[in-house]
Image (cartoon, rainbow, N blue to C red):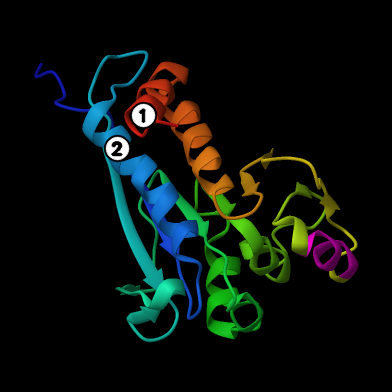
């Protein structure tokens, strides 16, 4: 039997929208790419294989902060096994949380995804989709009151860097998405793999 060249691939699908915060996407994405390039699975010693994509419910050219725009794919009709969906945050989150196509897609694929995560105020999108109902979650400190006020069935943890409640993960503001991504690497491939990734990124 041939020895596998790498650990089983894991798919990370970033959900972006017009007015997203660039660091909410770029920070976590770099964690997964650095893990794939420099770390190995803690148990098997095999190279890590994260496959990262960016999707959007609207135009495939998505404008973010810092006058930067990215190319995104259309929302997929199905998710591959081992897929984590990560909803980023940003100034455009209010419009995104009322986008029926985006919200409907999250509701449709919530059981299909291995994990669903939010970065920063992307938690408001998850809440609008009903994915935080009865769960603990966090968000940027500026939006904690709004999250609690508008979604009373969510327990908001104001002091957490990130929160895991079942398959739903959420992080606090902006750079906390990097901490969340490192926690996901540790969950997938062990603490040693996350430590190697953090060291490479000088975190």
Secondary structure under the numbered disc 2 in the rendered image:
helix
Q: Position of residue 44 (x, y in %)?
A: 30, 14
Whether residue 61 is situated above or below residue 78 in the rendered picture: below
Prevalent SS, magenta region: helix
Residue extending furthest left?
2
| In-front residue for pair 174/191 | 174
Residue 66, horizontal then vertical, whole percent: 42, 73
Do callouts 1 and 2 mark residues in contact (Cβ within 8 Å)?
yes
At 54% across and 49% down in the image, what residue appears? Answer: 175
Which residue corresponds to the image point at 57% horizontal and 58% vertical from the top-left?
Answer: 110
Vertical position of residue 58 compared to residue 36: above or below: below
Q: Is residue 68 left or right of residue 28?
A: left
Question: Does residue 87 appear to the left or right of 130 in the view shown?
Answer: left
Q: Position of residue 141 (x, y in %)?
A: 76, 56
Mark 2 = which residue?
A: 34
Q: CA distance from mark 1 to mark 2?
A: 6 Å
Residue 147 within the magenta-colored segment of the rendering: yes
Q: Quadrant of residue 163?
A: top right
The span shown in magenta is: 143-149
Q: Residue at x 36, y 13 (%)?
A: 43
The circle drawn on residue 49 is: none
């Amino acid at each position: 039997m041939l020895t596998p060249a790498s650990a089983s691939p894991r798919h990370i699908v970033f959900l972006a929208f017009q007015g997203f915060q660039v660091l909410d996407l770029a920070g976590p994405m770099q964690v997964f790419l650095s893990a794939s390039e420099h770390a190995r699975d803690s148990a098997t010693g095999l190279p890590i294989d994260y496959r990262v994509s960016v999707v959007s419910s609207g135009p495939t050219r998505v404008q973010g902060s810092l006058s930067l725009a990215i190319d995104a794919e259309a929302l997929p009709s199905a998710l591959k096994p081992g897929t984590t969906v990560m909803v980023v945050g940003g100034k455009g989150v209010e419009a995104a949380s009322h986008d029926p196509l985006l919200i409907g897609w999250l509701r449709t694929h919530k059981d299909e995804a291995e994990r669903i995560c939010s970065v920063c105020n992307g938690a408001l999108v998850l809440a609008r989709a009903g994915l935080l109902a009865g769960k603990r979650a966090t968000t940027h400190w500026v939006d904690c009151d709004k999250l609690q006020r508008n979604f009373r069935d969510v327990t908001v943890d104001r002091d957490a860097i990130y929160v895991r409640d079942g398959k739903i993960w959420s992080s606090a503001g902006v750079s906390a998405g990097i901490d969340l991504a490192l926690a996901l690497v540790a969950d997938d491939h062990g603490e040693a793999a996350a430590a190697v990734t953090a060291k490479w990124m000088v975190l």
